[in-house]
Image (cartoon, helix red, strand yellow):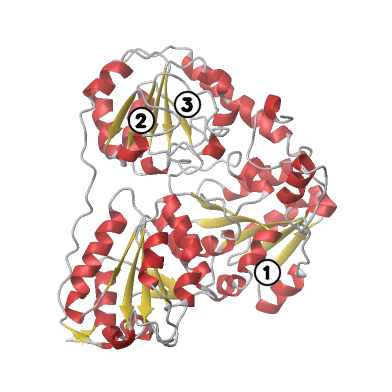
Amino acid sequence: MITVGEALVSCLEALQVDAAFGVVSIHNMPLLDAIHRRAKMRFVPARGEAGAVSMADAYARVSGKLGVVITSTGTAAANAAGGMVEARTAGTPLLHLTGQVDSPYLDRDLGFLHEARDQLGMLKTVSKTAFRVSAADETYDVLDFALKAALTPPAGPVSIEIPIDIQQAQAPLQQYHPSAPTLPPSQSVDTLADRLRKARRPLLWLGGGARHAGEPVRKLIDLGFGVVTSVQGRGIVPEDHPRCLGAFALACEELFATCDALLVVGSRLRSNETLGYRLKLPRPLYRIDAEEMRAEHPYKADVFLAGDARAALDALAQRLSGIKVDAAFGGDLEAARASAEARARGALGPYAALVGELQRLAGREFAWVRDVTISNSTWGNRLLRIFGARDGVHAVGGGIGLGLPMAIGASLGAPARRTVCLVGDGGLQLSLGELATLVQEKTDVVMILMNDRGYGVIRNIWDAQYGGRRAYADLHAPDFALLARSIGLTHHCVRDATQFSPVLELAFGQRGPVLVEVDMLSVGPYPVAFAGPPVRESEASQ
């Protein structure tokens, strides 16, 4: 017999989970004591629950494993809510283990220490689903239900709350054999194959739900398909492949007009990546998605197929051998990508040197983690090329402040790759305490801090939409050099565009965490002000 806390940890070990993230508390100590004593898993003590969830989220995205976060009950569990919403938006398989007050006082609203009214209901709203372990003999069954839900496409975060007396109770030690996730039933692809066979300039739009489908995607590319991706789908096809447009959909309407079929796979066709659903996409438009509910969308599919992306695309590739694709299509794809990149580069001004040096020094084996910043919106999400399906991590839901903790999780999830992280001074201040975690865990992260002393994009939106009446966008920020020195974090600063090359060369030549601060007030502004989700130039003044 072992404690329920140790039984849960032993199950995670059986799943080959090698890291968990969280904050220690009186209401989760049986779990953390088991991790500490058994010494088979790494526990990363974050400075806050919000950061811990983002770490586990990014860890799962880059490693392909289950992310695990451990929090306390009440306020601590509530602190995890924002990160859980992001993980759910991104479709990240994540297990959230949280404590709960002693069973005899549960759900009685007595004001018990760390109690939250209807915590389970709260967790259900921010998770894919949530469970409670109410007795020791339920432990393995509840965990099995939770893991199956977390891993079944579309994957997502699942919470389990365990009262502290249950964590301490005895349970039988047993070999844990998790149930396999339930794959969506694969519908017949024959009708879709018959229609696509007639196309001469077919295009794939790949989202994050196709991240595991790289092999059949390559087969379709070899048959002549072109590829464009959502930001979440970047790297499924290496972004230097001649038939890959990357995430430059907004710059490719002219090319889209020449395509005679579009197959969207594992993407929600989000509003910010389609000009609010007004981007002119090729027709006919077909979709493959794990969720049948995605059939209802502003972009109505001519054929919608519910199923697993990899299985469906593999079946399609088998049926489409011999498809006759326009010989000029490949050259047109390359020209469209080159034009889009040139236009994006032309809007960078002095920061073109930063992008070029990052690409050169990072090479092909790196994880590219980004917070929501002007720099990410103008070049981080598209221009800096990535080459693997698990190389890109960003805040899909658009919330700021996730970059730093995500960089920590990504670094531990892919230790063989360097992690490069892009943050702004406004977003960084939401998770400033995690700089200490960055150093304590000895992460191999080069963090690029774009410091414009405030919320730059908010300033631009004030200017563009509110007649220049600015408010609440300027921030008092710490002296980042002094802050870095106080916690033992290597710091460099760039104050002129000519310094990008030598400073980045120095940063990439060092191991461990490095902060490169870019003083944007000294370097200068971007030539084009970014003011929120993009619109067509013809619509900008309306």
Closer to the camera, 78 or 365? Answer: 78
Q: Which residue is mark 3?
A: 243
Q: Residue 7 falls in which quadrant of the image? A: bottom left
- Give the residue displayed 51% in from the left and 41% down from the top: 231
Q: Residues within 10 Å of mark 3 (few under 14, many from 20)?
A: many
Whether residue 425 is visible: yes
- Give the residue displayed 37% in from the left and 40% down from the top: 210
Q: Quadrant of the N terminus?
A: bottom left
Q: Residues within 10 Å of mark 2 (few under 14, many from 20)?
A: many
- Give the residue displayed 21% in from the left and 75% down from the top: 139
Marks 1, 2: nearer the viewer:
2
Q: Which residue is mark 1?
A: 490
Q: Quadrant of the C terminus?
A: top right
In percent of width and height, residue 328 lies at: 48, 12
Q: Secondary structure at mark 1?
A: strand
Asked whether, in this view, residue 513 is left or right of residue 117, the answer is right
Quote the CA–CA distance across marks 1 and 3: 40 Å
Q: Which residue is mark 2?
A: 287
Closer to the camera, 212 or 131? Answer: 131
Closer to the camera, 213 or 187? Answer: 187
Contact? badges 1 and 2 (CB < 8 Å)? no
Q: Amino acid at mark 1?
A: Thr
Label number found at residue 145: none
Q: Is residue 219 above or below residue 123?
A: above
In percent of width and height, residue 162 lies at: 31, 78
Q: Amino acid at mark 2?
A: Arg
Asked whether, in this view, residue 377 is left or right of residue 284, the answer is right
